[in-house]
């Protein structure tokens, strides 16, 4: 007998089926015991009576969250006992056999509530239990639907999904890298990708004119509430286009996605407003404006694009220029002298996608003129020989024919956080880390053995306050 999900039980009225799952709740009424069985599809009421003393005795010992399998006949619930809140609410299963797969200790916290009242550290430590609650299950199912919709939307428009490496080279292009030592090449290191930036540009050189990827990106950044050291982005790159075409396809993606998956939501303005960085700062005091008409309305979605960002930003503490977006962003001039002598005046072909006051995507047209790329890195404080050494793939590949191209990376986690009304991106990620990058469930980061260190030819030098 094949297993049937709780939501399908009504289809088998008068027939015998087998179900399996977790004991959500248990109620004893004299000679009858009721169990609400929970599986991935919902709840189903099971009925046990004392006609079979062996099963009845076993059921009396069962506790919440035990994992069981039950066979029996599906029948209508007595009139007046139906539960319209669940898919199986008109039927119940009269149990005829019972199998106990595993027992369970008392849970460290309840899972019936939304969970906001429970400390986040505790929830993250027991994440596999926290994910049993309905809200978390809903969030992850919606996440899957959003990714599936985006994937199909892009494939229908001739995009090719291509995976790029997780082990790459450490380069000075933004945030700190997470580095990985190489055992086979002592003294050398890989880096985990901050984004697929360099690879997706190489794919444009290779002739894949429309690329996308649901990509994992890893950045060793200081703690922030709306960031994780690893996150997921919908990465897009297109050849023979500029920012106008990229923004248009992204706009259509979200318009269609909201219409299909979130029909209760309404978008403030279509087409999405294009607001210059200067105008946004002057009018809203931020480059992430919330343009909703009613900011208290959770069903209103205020999308907008912010454009014409400064190419460079001054880092006062370090007394140096940094890239507002990243060094491969195309400046709105190719005058090398102007870039080098007046970096504060240079604007970029950069655009951010903002939703309800949160940045959910960032992109740009890319530099294809290698002299301009050299000038940009020089403004950022790098020497010519260092630039060619760190980014030799650009200076080699672009000599073999590079099309004009542009792209955007959209934060899936942050988009879901906003549209689902969550206050943290950790609420839409299956196994997130704490704000300071710890995985409390797996107890990571952790020390490794002396043997592992020796194989990697690494010695550990701890700060004085951490030395034992």
Image: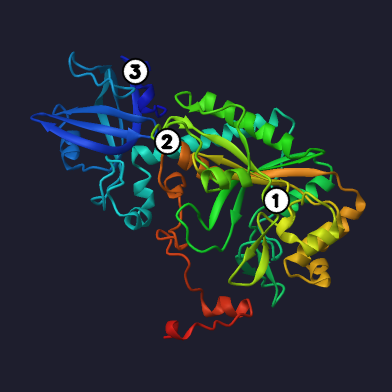
In the current view of this chain or complex, which residue is farthest to the right? 400
Disc 1 is placed on an element classified as loop
Residue 145 image position (x, y, % from top left)? 52, 33
Disc 1: CA contacts within 10 A as few (<14), some (14-19) or many (>=20) = some
Residue 346 image position (x, y, % from top left)? 74, 54
Q: Quadrant of the C terminus?
A: bottom left
In this figure, which colouring scheme has been used for the structure? Answer: rainbow
Q: Is residue 390 above or below residue 187?
A: above
Q: Please indicate whether residue 343 sits to the left or right of residue 397 in the image.
A: left
Q: Please indicate whether residue 395 sits to the left or right of residue 124 in the image.
A: right
Disc 2 is placed on an element classified as loop
How far apart marks 1 and 2 lie (CA) works out to 39 Å
Q: Quadrant of the N terminus?
A: top left
Residue at image position (72%, 66%) is: 380
Instruction: Name the mark nearer the viewer: 3 or 2.
Output: 2
Name the residue that disc number 1 marks: 164
Disc 3 is placed on an element classified as helix
Name the residue that disc number 3 marks: 10
Q: Is residue 214 visible?
A: no
Residue at image position (39%, 41%) is: 136
How far apart marks 1 and 3 lie (CA) works out to 46 Å
Residue 177 image position (x, y, % from top left)? 62, 65
Name the residue that disc number 2 marks: 295
Disc 2: CA contacts within 10 A as few (<14), some (14-19) or many (>=20) = some
Q: Is residue 380 visible?
A: yes
Depth order, front residue of 410/334: 334
Depth order, front residue of 38/463: 463
Residue at image position (57%, 46%) is: 282
Q: Please indicate whether residue 79 sits to the left or right of residue 279 in the image.
A: left
- The disc, 1 or 2, on the residue closer to the chain's N-terminal end is 1
């Amino acid at each position: 007998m094949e297993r049937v999900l709780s939501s399908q039980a009504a289809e088998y009225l008068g027939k015998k089926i087998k179900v399996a799952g977790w004991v959500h709740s248990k109620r004893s009424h004299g000679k009858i015991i009721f169990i609400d069985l929970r599986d991935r599809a919902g709840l189903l009421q099971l009925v046990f009576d004392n006609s079979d003393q062996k099963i009845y005795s076993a059921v009396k010992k069962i506790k919440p969250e035990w994992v069981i399998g039950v066979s029996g006949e599906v029948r209508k619930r007595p009139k007046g006992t139906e539960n319209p809140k669940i898919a199986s609410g008109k039927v119940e299963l009269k149990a005829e056999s019972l199998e106990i797969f595993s027992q369970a200790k008392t849970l460290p916290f309840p899972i019936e509530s939304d969970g906001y009242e429970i400390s986040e550290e505790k929830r993250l430590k027991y994440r596999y239990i926290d994910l049993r609650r309905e809200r978390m299950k809903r969030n992850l199912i919606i996440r899957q639907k959003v990714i599936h919709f985006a994937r199909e939307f892009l494939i229908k428009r001739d995009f090719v999904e291509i995976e790029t490496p997780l082990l790459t080279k450490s380069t000075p292009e933004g945030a700190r890298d997470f580095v990985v030592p190489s055992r086979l090449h002592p003294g050398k290191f890989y880096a985990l990708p901050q984004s697929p930036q360099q690879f997706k540009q190489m794919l444009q050189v290779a002739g894949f004119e429309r690329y996308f990827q649901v990509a994992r990106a890893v950045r060793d950044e200081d703690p922030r509430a709306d960031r994780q050291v690893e996150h997921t982005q919908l990465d897009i790159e297109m050849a023979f286009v500029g920012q106008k075409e990229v923004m248009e396809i992204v706009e259509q993606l979200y318009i269609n996605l909201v219409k299909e998956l979130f029909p209760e939501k309404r978008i403030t303005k279509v087409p999405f407003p294009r607001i210059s960085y200067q105008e946004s700062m002057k009018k809203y005091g931020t480059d992430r404006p919330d343009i909703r008409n009613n900011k208290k309305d959770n069903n209103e979605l205020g999308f907008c694009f912010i454009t014409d960002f400064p190419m460079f930003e001054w880092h006062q503490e370090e007394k140096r220029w940094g890239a507002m977006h990243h060094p491969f962003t195309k400046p709105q001039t190719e005058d090398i002298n102007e870039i080098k002598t007046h970096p504060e005046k240079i604007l970029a072909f950069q655009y951010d996608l903002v939703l309800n006051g949160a940045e959910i995507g960032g992109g740009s047209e890319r530099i294809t003129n290698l002299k301009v790329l050299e000038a940009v890195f020089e403004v950022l404080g790098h020497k010519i020989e260092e630039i060619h050494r760190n980014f030799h793939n650009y200076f080699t590949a672009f000599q073999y024919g590079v099309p004009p191209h542009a792209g955007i990376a959209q934060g899936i986690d942050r988009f879901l956080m906003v549209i689902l009304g969550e206050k943290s991106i950790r609420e839409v990620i299956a196994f997130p880390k704490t704000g300071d990058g710890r995985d409390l469930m797996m107890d990571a980061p952790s020390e490794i053995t002396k043997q592992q260190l020796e194989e990697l030819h690494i010695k550990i030098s701890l700060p004085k306050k951490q030395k034992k």
